[in-house]
Image (cartoon, rainbow, N blue to C red):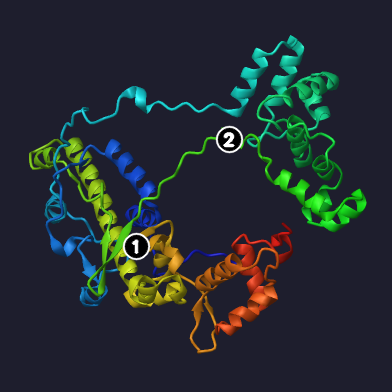
Amino acid sequence: MALELRQQLKLTQQLVMTPQLQQAIKLLQLSRVELDEVVEQELEENPVLEKGDTAEIESENQDPTKEETAEDAAKAEDTAEVGEPDDLGSIEDWQTYLQGYSQGGSIADGGDDDLPAYDNTLKVTETLHAHLLWQLQLGRYSDDVVQAAGVLLGNLDEAGYLYFALEELSLQFNVSEELLSQALEVVQQLDPPGVGARNLSECLHLQLKVLGLEGSLADILVTQYSADLEAQRYNVIARKCKVTEEEVYTAARVLRELDPYPGSAFTSTDVQYITPDVFVYKKADDYIVTLNDDGLANLGISSYYANIAKQKLDEKTSEYLQEKMRGAQWLLKSIYQRQKTIYRVTVSIVKFQREFFDKGINYLKPLVLRDVAEDIEMHESTISRVTTNKYLQAPQGLFELKYFFNSGIGTSTGEDMAATAVKSRIQDIVAAENPKKPYSDQKMVKILAEEGIIIARRTVTKYREMLGIRSSTARKRFF
């Protein structure tokens, strides 16, 4: 068999992900916080890009924050889907573009008169470990016990539990198991009561001991009948303990007052605030959609570097400056396209979910990504990126954009009802039930059927579990 080399021409089409296209797609799916981080990083790395207080968008046609109703949006000129941008061309091209986008300027030097005092910005939160160690240092314990107790404190979880066996800790830290056992008795006497417990029963037992209820019926429940107590088999417990059910109820009430997570008071959790990407508010009989461009609309090209670019420069300086100028332009253009796409998607959502904004959650309609994609002539993947980690502030509250996309549940009228609305109705039914006679899933199916909502029992069970609602047996209250 002979081998030979030959040339062949072949014409193919291939989508090339340019760095600019990758940046546009990346910015499109970022949350508001992540976008702010990217902008701050670009401001540090690109000297041409700056944020000025006086920068504003002059061209109405390129203003993604322009107020527009859902009806006006249908008449607006269609904007192309995020894709591969056009050729940037020469420096004059981006200078013309940026004149319509923003008026760059230097950042004004602000004073510190309105800032809080430095002392008022400090925040120190005592940890559970520090609180327990402080108590150990105050007590009169031997150095060996304190050292062994330190090993135990270092292995407590945030709730104050010790889930590691003493034998395992003994091998790992080369401390005798007997010494660790002595140290554990010391730790379990510290504040808060219940700390150092190895399970829930021991935690509640330690707290009852501090209250002087060691050996009481409540103590017997947590140490000997925890499984029956969890399953609320009070009649079984009463028969085994030879007491009345009322006495078991009284003991259970005592246990309900105890803290199953003694160390949670020392857990510091910083509040995470969500900044909405878009606002929807009602004006007359229509809804106005506006973008939250705070901190973004005033980005621009430094006028200082723009003037330098007009001068004759050496090759290396000119190449560096053009590269930074192009990078700044691409960022501004990508941010603009991101904001415009978010705006168009939100306007479409408001159009589809008009009844929700008028009447509330029970009127939320089934909606899928394809409906919005076809409405604004974009791809479903683009809609998916836009609605990820983006939030809408409306008169009804703060919602993630994905909240408005739901599957449909059939009704007796022939119209589908959004799954989210059905979940809300299930929550209302559970909230209104008698705690001593909670509704079973089958009973809720009948209640929903009376309201015209056709749903299977297994679907009710699935929605109930998604909402974190326990079964009717677990919800039942005996007192």
Q: Residues within 10 Å of mark 2 (few under 14, many from 20)?
A: some
Q: Which mark is residue 296?
A: none
Q: Quadrant of the C terminus?
A: bottom right
Q: Most extreme residue toward the bottom, as rendered?
A: 413
Rendered location of residue 324, percent (x, y): 23, 42
Label number found at residue 265: 2
- Expressed as whole percent of the image width and height from the top left, the position of residue 229 reads 80, 51
Along the viewing direction, whichever of 16 and 374 lies nearer the viewer: 374
Would you place residue 286 above or below residue 253 in this image?
Answer: below
Amino acid type, residue under disc 1 in the picture: Ala
Q: Is residue 317 above or below residue 436?
A: above
Secondary element type, mark 2: helix
Residue 361 lies left or right of residue 277; in this view the side is: right
Which residue is located at x 23 percent, y 37 percent?
Answer: 47
Q: Residues within 10 Å of mark 1 (few under 14, many from 20)?
A: some
- The quarter of the displayed image where residue 22 is located: bottom left
Residue 123 appears in the rendering: yes
